[in-house]
């Protein structure tokens, strides 16, 4: 069964990181940045919190 606001990033090294899902706005921005990075092939850096989720993405 699907979940509201459920997405993961695939990062170097083959690891999957869950995108922060605490609010619609944050989730939308983070998934948009991740999709843009994927589409353009641009590198990202990200901040992961102790909850194991990505809370910030920096797209260069």
Image (cartoon, rainbow, N blue to C red):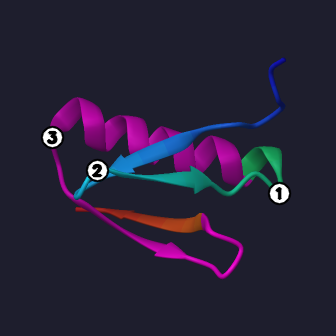
Asked if the residue at tag 2 contacts the one at tag 1, i.e. Cβ–Cβ closer than 8 Å, the answer is no
Q: Residue beneath label 1, please?
A: 22
The answer to which of 43 and 13 lies nearer the viewer is 13
Which numbered marker is on residue 41? 3
Residue 52, quarter of the rendered image: bottom right
Asked if the residue at tag 3 contacts the one at tag 1, i.e. Cβ–Cβ closer than 8 Å, the answer is no
Where residue 59 sits in the image (x, y, percent)?
31, 59
Residue 10, quarter of the rendered image: top left
In the rendered image, which quarter contains the N terminus? top right
Q: Residue placed at 60% from the left, 38% from the top?
A: 7
Q: In this view, does 33 lie to the left or right of 28?
A: left
Name the secondary structure under disc 1. Answer: loop
Which numbered marker is on residue 7? none
Q: In this view, does 58 lie to the left or right of 39?
A: right
Q: Residue placed at 23% from the left, 58% from the top?
A: 13
Name the secondary structure under disc 2. Answer: loop
């Amino acid at each position: 069964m699907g979940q509201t606001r459920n997405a993961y990033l695939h990062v170097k090294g083959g690891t999957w990181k869950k995108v922060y899902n605490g609010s619609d706005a944050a989730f939308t921005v983070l998934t948009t940045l991740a999709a843009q990075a994927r589409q353009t092939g641009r590198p990202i850096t990200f901040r992961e919190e102790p909850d194991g989720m990505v809370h910030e993405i920096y797209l260069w």
